[in-house]
Amino acid sequence: MLHDLRELYQAVILDHAAHPRNQGKLVTATSDQLVHNPSCGDTIHIYLQVNQGRIVAIQFTGSGCTISQASASLLTTVIKGKTMQEALTLADHFSALAMGQGAPKAGLGDAAILTQVMQFPTRIKCATISWWALKQAILTEQEGKV
Ligand code: ZN
């Protein structure tokens, strides 16, 4: 059972890494954030388009390991259409889960699969880098509107 589950997780991750969703520079972005993970060499650039507090479009560019790219792809599918506040809550929830804190709640969808990296401490940054970029992009967007 656990073995089957791992294979399913792996299939989802490999699918997103091979066929990234929402990849490419978003020309209509209202905020963006580039982050680098020196321990693995991953780079993720998140682009947001926010309209009346809601993330109406989200795209990313990047390079690096399978986990970092799959995590960014999964993130965009989960976050698109959410309010900035909902997205911040999910980002904090994802980061806590990836570090082995708290229990999974609804809302993360397939992205919750990536929180399994808590079993591999060296890969936690790979999974969380895109969520950290998202959070910074949202905070920048909110500051710009104050
Ligand atoms: Zn990595």
Image (tube, rainbow, N blue to C red):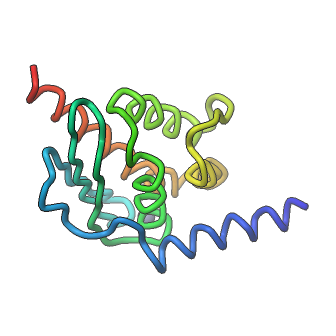
> Furthest-right residue in view?
1
View quadrant of ligand 1: bottom left
- Vertical side of 102 occupied by 82: above or below: below
Q: Is residue 41 left or right of residue 121?
A: left
Q: Which residue shows up at 66% across the image and 36% down it?
A: 104
Q: Position of residue 138 (x, y in %)?
A: 25, 36
Q: Residue 77: give x, y in percent of width and height.
A: 45, 55
Identity of the residue drawn at 56% across and 75% down: 15
Left or right? Give the position of 16 relative to 54. Answer: right
Residue 83, relative to residue 11: is it above or below? above
* Residue 115 percent location from the top left of the image: 59, 48
User: Outermost residue toward the bottom?
Assistant: 18
Q: Residue 31: x percent and y percent?
A: 15, 45
Is residue 10 toward the left or the right of residue 26 in the image?
right
Q: Quadrant of the C terminus?
A: top left
- At x 32%, y 69%, the residue is 23
**Quadrant the N terminus occupies:** bottom right
Q: Is residue 12 left or right of residue 128?
A: right
